[in-house]
Amino acid sequence: MAKSARYTPKSRRKALESVRTLITHSQIQRRIAEMAQEIRRDFPVEPLHLVGVLKGSVFFLTDLARQIGGDISLDFIAVSSYGSETHTSGQVKLTRDLDSSIEGKTVIVVEDILDTGMTLQYLLRVFEQRKPRRIRVAVLLDKPERRIAKVRADYVGFTIPNEFVVGYGLDYAERYRNLLDVGVLTLGAKEKNRKKTQ
Ligand code: IMP
Ligand code: MG
């Protein structure tokens, strides 16, 4: 693992950035198997409707769904709140709605990371109006230090410090989603200075 721990992109601009591994792919897989067990312990036979928040949750959702087993259906919703910056605008906008109704279903909202909580607060409000039987929230990562909105997840993979992370679905300006591990992104000096003046 140590050899792949540092990923340095090739181009000049991207070479200013580096990623330091925080959680390895095998740690993620082990934890997802445990989370799946927790979920099936709470809902042993019930059909579960997993709703993934695009795009960050895709790898987490597909791995989690296969570990939970039993009667599972999937849907996706997309919101935008981040743009290409590492700081949220605080505004959440629905950019793609669900394909099917959630009325009467046991819904598990699957998110990559719970940060300020603005996204989940918005989504939970939208979903509650649609009369599901129950709603639970599963997140791979939780950054509690950054919380603004009063929301909590029922199932949390890892609690992490207040650092900007990428990989396993999480991006910076749409890049790094395909990294197997989750790592802390460090921007180069030039990039940091540019961001400060924005
Ligand atoms: P929240 O609304 O502030 O809780 O942010 C939720 C969304 O912001 C997540 O679904 C991510 O898409 C994005 N986000 C928050 N923190 C990070 C991070 O450290 N890396 C990448 N994306 C993040
Ligand atoms: Mg996301």
Image (tube, grey):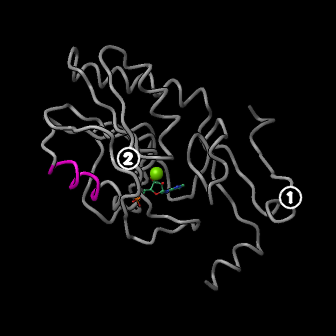
Instruction: Left or right? Give the position of 158 relative to 38.
Output: right
Residues 164 and 159: in front is 164
Task: Give the image quarter of residue 52.
Answer: top left
Percent across and percent down for residue 148 are 32, 66
Instruction: Say what secondary structure mark 1 lies in.
Output: loop
- Compared with residue 156, is residue 48 higher up or lower down, i.e. above or below? above
Q: Indicate the quadrant containing the C terminus: top left, top right, bottom left or bottom right.
A: bottom right
Looking at the rendered structure, the kind of residue marked 2 is Ile
Q: Could you tell me which residue is drawn at 50 percent across and 54 percent down?
A: 161
The boundaries of the magenta stretch are 121-129
Most common secondary structure along the magenta stretch: helix
Provide the residue designation for mark 2. Answer: 77
Q: Could you tell me which residue is drawn at 63 percent across and 38 percent down?
A: 181
- Compared with residue 90, is residue 117 higher up or lower down, i.e. above or below? above
Q: CA distance from mark 2 to mark 1?
A: 33 Å
Looking at the rendered structure, the kind of residue marked 1 is Ser
Q: Could you tell me which residue is drawn at 77 percent across and 35 percent down?
A: 2
**Label 1 Cα neighbours within 10 Å, binned few <14 / some 14-19 / many ≥20:** few
Q: Name which of mark 2 and mark 1 comes first in the sequence.
A: 1
Instruction: Name the front one of labels 2 and 1.
Output: 2
Provide the residue designation for mark 1. Answer: 11
Q: Is residue 123 magenta?
A: yes
Instruction: Left or right? Give the position of 115 relative to 28.
Output: left
Q: Is residue 50 magenta?
A: no
Task: Give the image quarter of residue 51.
Answer: top left
Residues 158 and 175: in front is 175
- Compared with residue 140, is residue 149 higher up or lower down, i.e. above or below? below
Q: Indicate the quadrant containing the N terminus: top left, top right, bottom left or bottom right.
A: top right
